[in-house]
Amino acid sequence: MKHIILLLGCLGCLFAGCSEPSYRLTVSIYGNGSLPGDTVYLYRFNEETLQFEKGDSAMLDDRQQVCFTGKYTGPEFVCGGVRKKATSKFFMLDSTEVFAYNVLLHEEPNFFNPSGYKLTKKYMIVEGGRESAILDYYQGMERLTLLPDQLKSGDAFKEGVMMDMLVKFPNSRAMLMILNNERKRFSMDRLGEALSLFDSPELIGHPLYKELVAYREAVMKTSVGQVVPDFSLPSMNGEEVAIRSFRGKYVLLDFWASWCGPCIGEMPNVHKAYDLLHDKGFEVISISTDRKESDWRKAMKEKQMEHFVNLRDTKGVLHEIFNRDAIPFILLLDPQGRIVAKELRGKDIYEVAIESMNK
């Protein structure tokens, strides 16, 4: 009988040793916006959708803390959020004991933050494994962009910081996420250089890495000098109009919307380009991103745009082909459909076209 008990005890220890370890994540939230009883959510990064999704929840206790526990299966991206208030920046759950500290502030509500609440993302402190330390180091370097000498060159400075950190901390999951979040700061050559610094098979196969590779390839296809990929969109009468049908002309592509103040502000320059150059083989293709067709038609009439080729982006061309979410986005194409210039604003909208057509 003793032998059986001993055997069972050994098997129990064996199974316990083989079981997955548990993690304990303690989140502390302070400030003039946080109250005991607030519901705090733990959001986990879904590697299939590349989005953070709501997971566990707990109530903030009298010590301004919540504790999340579960099986630790390896490093993962997470973030916290206070119900109906604010969500933190992402951080790494990359060890079995992690502590996260943040401050919840409340300001005057505005258009971009109607609740008025925000978590201090840059000054969040996370104590845990290697990736958490890397994130804290990055945040410290990022704060240097607030120095007066760095204000004018903030983007270049941050790019330099990221490149230095990719060398200093090779194959970091945290840096992979930062690179993905800041990818628009990089030229495509520089982004390719950054991607080449990852050599871990695990990270090269990670969905975020693949997303960055796909993003770079897509942007390269719409860089200056490349022939714009063909697409077709509905016109005012519902007819599908293909961009390739305008080969032989210089074309100004203007992505805009009725609600976009800067887009409306550029309309006089777009009209001037048309008035100066239309008789010389120049066309304006105005592409609205308005969700409501009625808003699109009303704005066209008010801004006297009937003489343009007016299309509506019902297929997400701005995002899917040009990897853009912000407008206005104005490009010039030559008669072969090659992109001559991008991000045109102000007088460049007509001056670059005039210069190109006079060559």
Image: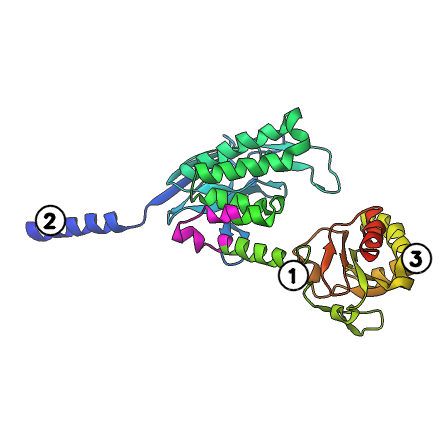
What is the x, y in percent for residue 87?
59, 42
Q: Decide: is 260 above or below 294.
A: above
Q: Is residue 290 left or right of residue 216?
A: right
Label 2 crowding class (10 Å Cα cut-off): few <14, some 14-19, many 20+?
few
Q: Along the polypeptide, which appears first: circle 1 or circle 3?
A: 3
Is residue 207 part of the magenta span, yes or no?
A: yes
Q: Which residue is mark 2?
A: 6
Relative to the observer, which residue lies in front, 68 or 21? 21
Q: Which residue is mark 1?
A: 320
Q: Would you say the residues marked 1 and 3 are in contact, meaning their CB atoms lie under 8 Å apart?
A: no
Q: Residue furthest bottom?
A: 239
Q: Would you say the residues marked 1 and 2 are in contact, meaning their CB atoms lie under 8 Å apart?
A: no
Q: Secondary structure at mark 3?
A: helix
Q: Would you say the residues marked 2 and 3 are in contact, meaning their CB atoms lie under 8 Å apart?
A: no
How was the colour assigned to the protein in this rendering? rainbow
Q: CA distance from mark 1 to mark 2?
A: 64 Å
Q: Which residue is mark 3?
A: 275
Is residue 335 part of the magenta span, yes or no?
A: no
Q: Secondary structure at mark 2?
A: helix
Q: CA distance from mark 2 to mark 3?
A: 94 Å
Q: Decide: is 249 above or below 18.
A: below
